[in-house]
Image (tube, rainbow, N blue to C red):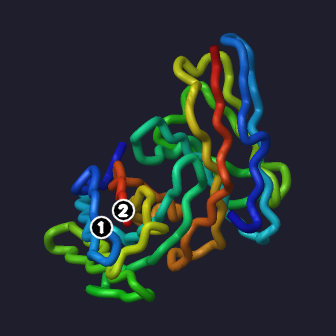
Amino acid sequence: SQQGEEDPQALSIQEGENATMNCSYKTSINNLQWYRQNSGRGLVHLILIRSNEREKHSGRLRVTLDTSKKSSSLLITASRAADTASYFCATDTGTASKLTFGTGTRLQVTL
Amino acid sequence: DGGITQSPKYLFRKEGQNVTLSCEQNLNHDAMYWYRQDPGQGLRLIYYSQIVNDFQKGDIAEGYSVSREKKESFPLTVTSAQKNPTAFYLCASKPQGSIYEQYFGPGTRLTVT
């Protein structure tokens, strides 16, 4: 089952602009994680935010978590062409640290 | 992808044949996971293992089998009972504990005709 739904499904922006992706989920979580996937490749972990945290930063990435709304957002600032990829949120509900992935947002950054 | 290898990168099989996908990690991680990804979709959990000689079914285990005889290795067999086996298969591992992320291998693309 897909716990997370991401919005938008696809996003096209120009280099230098900010990109915002949203994730909604259904059940209580231990933490929420964001991953990136380049076409045909494995996933790369970007950031993990725990259920008792509201915001986290890592370089050009900013993640927020609102557990009352069961939603999270990923902001990529000053995007680059190399940021072109699919981005997935994944929720950890604490059972054996299994992750349930959303459907992903495909980001295209053009020059 | 560091530390987790999956082989081969591409695999082709005829319908009715079983096929085993390899996953090896040298990160000394206790937990390992197998996911399936279909085009334009997120990942779905097939099987996972938290310790050697123990594994549990994920959300879509039917038609698949695994073993965990060594900490480093978690092979996945796609059996002929899997009705729609063509997909991208990803293996991951992580240390025990809830604060850690999963580390993914590069994936194996399986095509069954």
Q: Residue at x 68, y 33 (%)?
A: B65
> Mark 2: few, some, or many residues within 10 Å (few <14, many ≥20)?
some
Which chain is home to disc 2?
Answer: A
For marks 1 and 2, the one nearer the N-term is 1
Q: Is residue B77 shown left or right of residue A102? A: right
Task: Report how far apart the C-alphas of labels 1 and 2 lie in the structure.
Answer: 5 Å
Q: Is residue B30 left or right of residue A22?
A: right
Q: Amino acid at mark 1?
A: Gln
- Give yes or no for contact between labels 1 and 2 (Cβ–Cβ under 8 Å): yes
User: Looking at the picture, how far across and down is residue A65, in whole percent?
Assistant: 26, 77
The one of A97 and A100 positioned closer to us in this rendering: A100
Residue B78: image x %, image y %? 67, 28
Residue in front for this viewpoint, A46 or B22: A46
Q: Nearer the viewer, residue B73 or B91?
A: B91
Q: Which mark is residue A110?
A: 2
Residue A33, given in percent of the width and then of the height, sits at 42, 70
Residue A1 visible in the snapshot: yes
